[in-house]
């Protein structure tokens, strides 16, 4: 079992910045990807950004040029630096991590953290 602990989030004004963190813990796992999703009220959960262990990244078009995903492999932690925030970025942000365990794959989700951008 891989546990995720998210931190960051809160209230920020439009144009501001915020950083989210997500730390994975457990034993016997090997990460293959770490990412962030978000879900706004009344909308489906959508991918924000993902980073693979090789370092490749993908971003939603709506956040390209504003958000940066990074990771610290020594800490099994993924970060989402969010800049030039807009009210439409308001959502619950979820960390998603996947990889391999000794006998199976895993795909774990964080508890979610609220990000609210005021206009």
Image (spheres, rainbow, N blue to C red):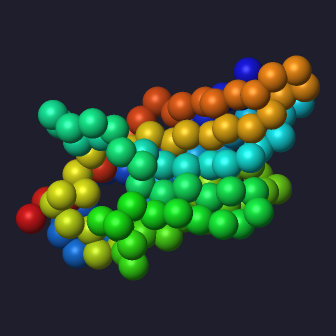
The vertical placement of 37 against 26, above or below, is: below
Residue 71, compared with residue 99, is above or below; it is: below
Q: Is residue 109 left or right of residue 54?
A: left
Visible residue check, residue 114: no
Q: Looking at this view, is 102 or 27 the one in front?
A: 102
* Residue occupying the far left of the picture: 119
Q: Quadrant of the C terminus?
A: bottom left
Q: Position of residue 11 (x, y in %)?
A: 25, 54
| Residue drawn at the location 23% of the way across and 51% of the way down | 90
Q: How many marks?
A: 0
On-image quarter of the N terminus:
top right
Identify the residue at the far bottom of this view. 65
Q: Is residue 102 visible?
A: yes
Depth check, front residue: 49 or 78: 49
Closer to the camera, 109 or 44? 44
Q: Is residue 34 left or right of residue 55?
A: left
- Residue drawn 89% across the image and 30% down it: 28
Tell me where residue 112 appears, x and y as whole percent: 42, 35
Q: Locate residue 18: give its quadrant.
A: bottom left
Say which quarter of the image contains residue 71.
Answer: bottom right
The x, y position of residue 32, in whole percent, is: 74, 47
């Amino acid at each position: 079992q891989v546990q995720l602990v998210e931190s960051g989030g809160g209230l920020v004004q439009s144009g501001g910045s915020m950083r989210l963190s997500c730390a994975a813990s457990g034993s016997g796992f090997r990460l293959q990807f770490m990412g962030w999703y978000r879900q706004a009220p009344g909308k489906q959960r959508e991918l924000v950004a993902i980073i693979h262990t090789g370092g490749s990244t993908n971003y939603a078009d709506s956040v390209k040029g504003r958000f940066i995903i990074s990771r610290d492999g020594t800490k099994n932690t993924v970060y989402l630096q969010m800049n030039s925030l807009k009210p439409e970025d308001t959502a619950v942000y979820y960390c998603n991590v996947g990889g391999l365990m000794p006998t199976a794959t895993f795909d774990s989700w964080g508890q979610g953290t609220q990000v609210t951008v005021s206009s």
